[in-house]
């Protein structure tokens, strides 16, 4: 018990008739019920430095406002559809980065691994005549193998992940150049399903609306189920009104986005795949034992080990998952560009993937983060890239601005962390 | 030494029995030929100076270290404790000195860490109810189990760590310095907690440097000195006796007197820090 409460009566211990709920017995806790309570709790959280995805949403609004005023084409349906196509490739890579950051490690080689995967698909599919699905599967498996090697280096030799993956960055890039050989570039056939998927395939309009509606309904259904279970068990439950407001807000927002994108070609299937992966990883991180172990190891590795968690296996899963996502991102990038070249995965791919996760709010210090940070972060980065391209600015400026945004994101992360410490929440 | 141990009045069935436990770290023998019995419904305090081997012994029982030689009999069977999960599976729960809590997780997640209900779709409601039940059984005053552990005070964290150790219905609880970092009121709370754990019929082995705390809750006091057994005492033993056993003055009138004087000096130091 805390010192501040030492002079209190013992009412707090026993269920008082006024509050029959198991978790509402303590007089020191303010009960945030209803819609206003939810808003108040949110403001409290933000004030104490628990920012969640607030900075990235604010940042996105600023960036979009600036670029829209500079060039009205920026927020056109057409440009946004292109933006979503471009987001999906690096976004999938960034999703893997979220996984390794959760356990407090890093993978600096995701760019190389993605480039290697795209080269592998090109060589196996176009040059060797494998079926395309088998080539993709092989690329993902090889990527997973690379991640497994990092995990072994980390678990068995205690090699810091930033060193092993930095070495991997060079080695895998070498492999990519080696298998591409002297030609240096393989064109993937236009009109093939893979290239169509990366360049043109969009959801039928009705499907986009249906998925948006389903998402809203799913939010309400799961929330309602939890609330009834909590009520039945004698725990406090969130108000139905608040839940309904949230679900309707999500549903309306998604329907509006779908409607706006449908004015042009529609929602890319590739973006649908990316969002599907984000939702799946989010579920795995927050609602499964594996995800709980990942968060625990990121917070306190030794505590997790003493709690009986197989720490090595969890690290292995994180590295393998990251490399598999990097390979998947590489395959998508090859589909988007219709080619597997020596340049694939080089340049800013690495940094963009890592920056997206951090900008989105996943902490570099481990133990804090969310799969949604990959989605939000990559939209910020792609927006900057797209906006600067529309303004006809050179890549030199683009690099500088992206670098500045990353620096700001890390500063916000550090300041929020400091604030959480001083508010006793870190 | 075993003679002394067998004199102990058993309060319940014998839960843990150590014989001839030794542990070497390279050329250093941290523990030599340790014997120790713990019964159900009994609080045994393990005391000794710094470097006496208390923490090493607890780590062996927790499965963190492995004994070089010796036998561990737990619940009537000879066991080997290869890793922490083996100890947990047998029913030996440990509350480490640093508590080993994940500050970025909430109270429920910490209590159930590594033992979550329903691994593929965590049953948060059932876990929260169980957490409240455990905390209420301990009469613990945690304001909210959905707060991260980082926001809790030292005593509250200790409570969470003890509640976590009770989750698996263990037969033996090891407490490493449970009161070391706590204030006066919080120490009293934790000592109450230990008594409640004993009332539930569990065996408790606790390490402490604080003789007052030890005498307040322990049924027996086992002294280690330089990695060896150095006597078993009961709470009615005088401070002088305990301290001379801890510091190593042997049992004759001259050294008793020296021990007394040293004890008084040390007590004096404790009184005015």
Image: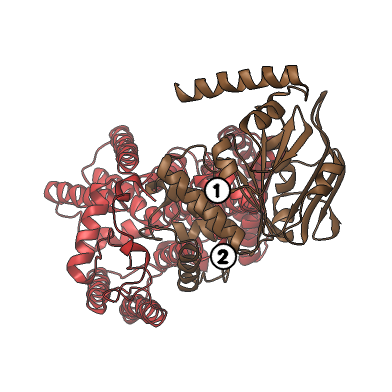
Chain colours: A red, B brown
Give the side of residue A331 with respect to residue B60, left or right.
left
The answer to which of B38 and A293 lies nearer the viewer is B38
Q: Chain of mark 2?
A: B
Residue drawn at the location 31% of the way across and 51% of the way down: A5
Quadrant of the snapshot with the N terminus of chain B? top right
Kind of element beneath mark 1: helix
Which is nearer the eye, A59 or B232? B232
Left or right? Give the position of A43 relative to B95. left
**What residue is pinned by disc 2?**
B116
- Tell me if I can see residue A73 in this picture: yes
Among the 4 quarters of the image, the one containing residue B29: top right
Q: Please tell me in which quadrant of the rendered image residue B177 appears.
A: top right
Q: Element type at marker 2?
A: loop
Where residue A123 appears, as percent x and y from the top left, is 64, 52
Image location of residue A18, percent across then percent down: 26, 75
- Residue B96: image x %, image y %? 60, 44
Above or below, A210 relative to B78: below
**Relative to residue A373, is residue A302 depicted above or below?**
above
């Amino acid at each position: 018990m805390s010192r501040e409460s030492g002079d209190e009566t013992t009412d707090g211990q026993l269920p008082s008739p006024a509050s029959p709920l198991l978790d509402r017995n303590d007089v020191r806790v303010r009960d945030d019920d209803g819609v206003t309570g939810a808003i108040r709790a949110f403001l409290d959280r933000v004030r104490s430095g628990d920012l969640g995805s607030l900075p990235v949403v604010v940042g996105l609004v600023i960036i979009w406002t600036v670029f829209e005023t500079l060039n009205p084409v920026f927020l056109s349906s057409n440009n946004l559809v292109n933006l979503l196509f471009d987001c999906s490739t690096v976004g999938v890579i960034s999703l893997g980065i979220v996984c390794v950051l959760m356990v407090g490690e890093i993978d600096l080689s995701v760019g190389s691994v993605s480039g290697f995967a795209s080269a592998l698909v090109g060589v196996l599919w176009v040059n060797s005549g494998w079926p395309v699905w088998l080539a993709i599967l092989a690329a993902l498996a090889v990527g997973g193998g690379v991640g497994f090697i990092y995990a072994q280096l980390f678990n068995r030799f205690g090699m810091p992940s930033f060193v092993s993956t930095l070495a991997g960055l060079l080695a895998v890039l070498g492999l990519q150049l080696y298998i591409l050989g002297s030609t240096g570039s393989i064109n993937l056939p236009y009109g093939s399903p893979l290239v169509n998927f990366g360049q043109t395939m969009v959801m039928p309009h009705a499907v986009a609306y249906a998925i948006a509606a389903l998402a809203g309904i799913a939010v309400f259904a799961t929330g309602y189920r939890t609330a009834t279970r909590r009520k039945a068990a004698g725990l406090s439950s969130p108000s139905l009104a608040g839940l309904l407001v949230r679900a309707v807000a999500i549903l309306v927002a998604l329907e509006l986005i779908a409607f706006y994108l449908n004015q042009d070609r529609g929602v890319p299937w590739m973006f649908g795949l990316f969002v599907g992966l984000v939702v799946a990883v989010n579920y795995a991180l927050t609602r499964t034992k594996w995800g709980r172990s990942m968060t625990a190891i990121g917070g306190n590795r030794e505590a997790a080990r003493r709690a009986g968690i197989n720490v090595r296996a969890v690290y292995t899963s994180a590295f393998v998952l990251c490399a598999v996502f990097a390979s998947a991102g590489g395959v998508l990038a090859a589909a988007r560009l219709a080619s597997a070249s020596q340049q694939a995965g080089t340049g800013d791919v690495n940094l963009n993937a890592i920056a997206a996760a951090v900008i989105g709010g996943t902490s570099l210090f481990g133990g804090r983060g969310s799969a949604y940070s990959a989605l939000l972060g990559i939209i910020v980065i792609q927006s900057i890239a797209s906006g600067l391209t529309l303004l006809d600015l050179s890549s030199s400026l683009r690099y500088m601005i992206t670098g500045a945004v990353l620096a700001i994101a890390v500063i916000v992360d550090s300041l929020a962390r400091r604030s959480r410490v001083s508010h006793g929440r870190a | 030494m075993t003679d002394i141990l067998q004199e102990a009045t058993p309060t319940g069935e014998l839960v843990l029995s150590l014989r001839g436990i030794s542990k070497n770290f390279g050329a250093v023998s941290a523990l030599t030929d340790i014997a120790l019995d713990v019964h159900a419904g009994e609080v045994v305090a393990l005391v000794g100076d710094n470097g006496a081997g208390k923490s090493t012994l607890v780590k062996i029982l927790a499965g963190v270290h492995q004994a070089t030689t010796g036998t561990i009999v737990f619940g009537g069977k000879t066991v080997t404790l290869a890793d922490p999960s083996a100890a947990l599976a047998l029913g030996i729960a440990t509350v480490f000195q640093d508590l080993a809590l994940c500050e970025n997780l909430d109270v429920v997640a910490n209590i159930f860490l590594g033992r979550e209900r329903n691994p593929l779709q965590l049953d948060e409601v059932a876990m929260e109810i169980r957490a409240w039940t455990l905390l209420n059984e301990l009469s613990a005053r945690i304001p909210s189990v959905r707060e991260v552990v980082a926001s809790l005070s030292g005593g509250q964290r200790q409570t969470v760590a003890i509640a976590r150790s009770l989750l698996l219905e263990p037969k033996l609880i090891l407490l490493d310095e449970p009161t070391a970092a706590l204030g006066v009121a919080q120490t009293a709370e934790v000592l109450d907690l230990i008594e409640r754990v004993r009332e539930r019929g569990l065996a408790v082995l606790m390490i402490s440097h604080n003789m007052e705390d030890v005498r307040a809750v322990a049924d027996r006091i086992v002294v280690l000195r330089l990695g060896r057994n150095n006597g078993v005492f009961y709470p009615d033993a005088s401070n002088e006796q305990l301290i001379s056993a801890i510091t190593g003055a042997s049992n004759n009138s001259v050294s008793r007197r020296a021990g007394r004087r040293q004890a008084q000096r040390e007590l004096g130091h404790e009184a005015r820090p």
